[in-house]
Image (spheres, coloured by chain):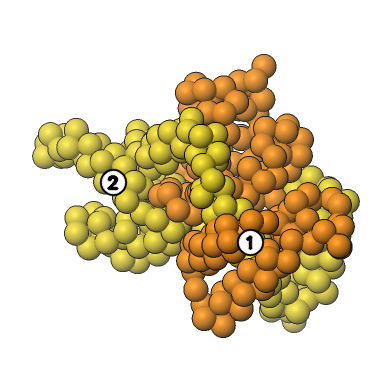
Chain colours: A yellow, B orange
Amino acid sequence: MKDKKIEKDHLYWKLFSTCFVISMCTFGGGLVIISMLQKKFVEELEWIDHEEMLDLVAIAQSCPGVMAVNSATIIGYHLAGIPGAILTAFGSILPPMIILSVISVFYKQFRENRIVALILRGMQAGVAAVLIHLSFTMSKTALEDRKILSIALFAISVVGVAFFGVDVIIAILFCGIAGGISVLYESRKQEKGKHI
Amino acid sequence: MTYFQLFLQFFLIGAFSFGGGLASMELIRQRVVAQQGWLTNSEFSDIISISEMTPGPLGINIASFVGVRIAGIPGTIISTCSYVLPSIFIVITISWIYYRYRTLKGVQGVLKGLRPAIAAMVIASALKLTCNAFWGSVDTIDLPATNLVAVAVCALMLVLLHKKKVSPVQAILCSGLIGAVVYGVTGL
């Protein structure tokens, strides 16, 4: 216990600095950051074991928001309570915040440069392609259970959001509630089946 | 008032961003572009490109960028922090439940239910940003004025993404280079 107290400052600093460095050096989103966090906290520092890490990642994926920040927050919470959670979250949002603030300030000059403007214009087609591709993969996952409920929710959401400008938040709440009710209904049905 | 709007909009975006970076683009676009007019659709597409090439998650990058543009450094601090605030709160609550009960069954059920909404969201943003790339606007489709270069590059990238499994970053970089050369040479 005494050791833990002495190490507390060290722990806080380590949590903050690790998340700061990982967030600053990692390109390419969520899963990459999670594998870096795993390498550091599970393999190098051995503060978390493998099994637990899997569950922590599952929680991070279930929560709204950015998966990388969520994972860092859970690790912080797990190792040092609420102060730890705040430190790791802050450590991971600080680098992108600084970088994008700088870009934002120079965006106008940046955009007016002829070559940059041409590149960014070309990239709009690439962004479109990435989103179209993601649409297909996401639709496939959404419909893979082949249930009427999923198909109906999917059809209603697509038409509503894409063509009638329905607020995405409403679509999410609607589908979340419908999904929750169907899970409840199914688990009840299963329980009844057991009794018979 | 601006500070409050920044806080409110990004808090809502943060609370409902399910499914990761690109999946929540339509949620952000509806609020930041369509409702508040903080960015144009083209600027929004630019930010996605820039974000893919700078470290850090997409949502945070957009929050930081918009914050600075609307209200300077205080703006960026407000928008970025309010964006992650709901998830920090929810993450801590769920971890607490997890350590107490060691199960996440109910949570996973609701999440599965969300999938159709998330897919719908991606489709909507794909439609809007594709229209923007092809016709320079999200709600007018003017067939004679189609940007054929964009259509060709987009089709090529789709094939690469699907068949060669290139990453989104590679696809966006590649389309930027091709686009710059073609637009530069033809002077379109």
Closer to viewer: mark 2 or mark 1: 1
State which chain disc 1 sits on: B
State which chain disc 2 sits on: A
**Label 1 neighbour load within 10 Å: few <14, some 14-19, many 20+:** few
Asked if residue A84 lies left or right of residue A45, the reply is: right
What amino acid is at disc 1? Thr
Residue B186 shows which numbered tag?
A: 1
Disc count in the image? 2
Residue A21 shows which numbered tag?
A: 2
What amino acid is at disc 2? Val
- Quarter that holds the C terminus of chain B: bottom right
Toward the top, the furthest residue is B1
**SS for dot 2:** helix
Question: In the rendered image of this protein, does residue A186 appear above or below residue B45?
Answer: below
Query: Which x, y percent locates residue A186?
Result: 74, 70
Question: In the rendered image of this protein, does residue A36 appear above or below residue B97?
Answer: below
